[in-house]
Amino acid sequence: MTSSTSPTSAPLRVRSIPAGHDYVRHAVGRAADPTSGGAPGVATDPTSGAATDPAGIVVLADPLLDPAEPSRWWPHPALEAAERPEVLDGADLVHVHFGYEHRSPAQVAEFVAAVRSRGLPLVVTVHDLTNPHEADPAAHLERTGHLVLGADAVVTLTAGAAGEIRRRWGVDSQVIPHPRLMPVGVTEPYRLSRLEQRAPRPPERRTVGVVLGSLRAGVAAEGLLPQLADALPADADLVVMVRSDALAAAHAPGHARHEAALALDTLAERPDVEVRSHDLLTDGELCRALAGFDALVLPHRHGTHSGWLELCRDLGLPPVIPRVGYLVEQWGSPAGSYDPADPTALELRRGLATALGGPPVPARAADAEDSAVAAAHAALYRAARAAVASHRGVGSHRGVGSDHVSPRD
């Protein structure tokens, strides 16, 4: 079956892996919703559930894996294209974002070969060169290398990451900034309220937040939090948010995060620290909780980019950023930072002073708004499809050359 022979002006159907993630919905297209903050004019095809935009990009909906959990897209069946070629039916282009950790490097290589055998353009966004949820980076780099070397176009979020991709694999990539993470209708009221509250007011206690989520491998706790508590200004409290199910599991002796659970128990005894365990939060509940903080300390041990920074940007919440990967570059504005390999109370105190006493968080740049990011992806998709069509059967599968796709550095 051929899928990419239609004219350039025809709708282009994208099998995004995944489609149902917040980043993808904002970066490529999402269903029309007055509170969504998505690209203007984006609509949903009522027959397929796919999102379309005025440029004619159709993002195919993720397959329904579990009727009881309709939003779950993982493990994504499209990654099994080598074993099940039919999972690519109906697509004109494949775009891999993330969610391939469960596949071996060999299976990822077979997936790339399966996409190429169908004559489909392959676009890859390198969100993470170091997977924030895996302790050993080697396997993730090998998987990502297969995708990068087999892609017709590579995207990443910062010029620093683009440079590393070029050094590792000799491949140029286009830098497209991270769009917002949550709908503008959810976050904007909190950002505007924060700006209004910066007017002079009587002294009051401030709150520094840390979100540990499910205590995954890439999230610091025992090394960071005691130092952070000691770094608090005299007028500030610390709130540590953690999933209740993860915290309960971590209290079991022998659990990989048992030391973190013990550290949280000790911290909870301090009068200026609250360990706030919670169930899975909705977008609105999470934003409401974060809006109650005066600064957010990101607890990443490793990683490349972070959606948490984009949520801080859209809430107007100043972050304290670990110096890992390209997080500081992704933020792009003055901010407090610290070394997660050796967090000291002195450095964290300086970071908190910058976050709590600095200027307001700058508004999102125009090229990182949803409509601009979606337009950049639409142009990239059409160029990749045209290049692959022109090269079909005459040599290299790589269709978009470095003259078209190059980092902004």
Image (tube, rainbow, N blue to C red):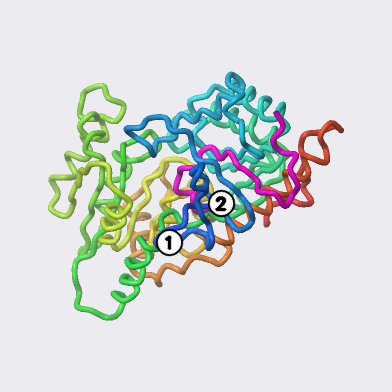
**Contact, mark 1 vs mark 2 (Cβ under 8 Å):** no
Looking at the image, residue 222 sits to the left or right of residue 110; the answer is: left
Based on the picture, tell me whether residue 31 belongs to the magenta stretch.
no
Looking at the image, residue 278 sits to the left or right of residue 379; the answer is: left
* Residue at image coords 61%, 31%: 89
Looking at numbered disc 1 in the image, what kind of residue is underneath it? Arg
Q: Position of residue 312 (x, y in %)?
A: 39, 58
Q: How many marks?
A: 2
Q: Which residues are magenta?
A: 1-28
| The image quarter in which residue 266 lies | top left
* The C terminus - image quarter: bottom right
Residue where numbered disc 1 is placed: 313
Q: Position of residue 246 (x, y in %)?
A: 26, 34
Tell me the SS state at disc 1. helix
Badge 1: few (under 14), some or many (20 or more) residues near its Cα, within 10 Å?
many
Q: Position of residue 162 (x, y in %)?
A: 64, 47
Q: Which marked residue is nearer to the observer: mark 1 or mark 2?
A: 2
Looking at the image, residue 146 sits to the left or right of residue 180; the answer is: right
Residue at the outermost front position = 47
Mark 1 or mark 2, which has the lower sequence index? Answer: 2
Q: Position of residue 399 (x, y in %)?
A: 77, 41
Tell me the SS state at disc 2. strand
Seen from the viewer's position, the closer of residues 231 and 22 is 22
* The N terminus - image quarter: top right
* Residue at image coords 49%, 47%: 46
Residue where numbered disc 2 is placed: 52
Whether 14 is drawn above or below 26: the answer is above
Whether 390 is drawn above or below 41: the answer is above
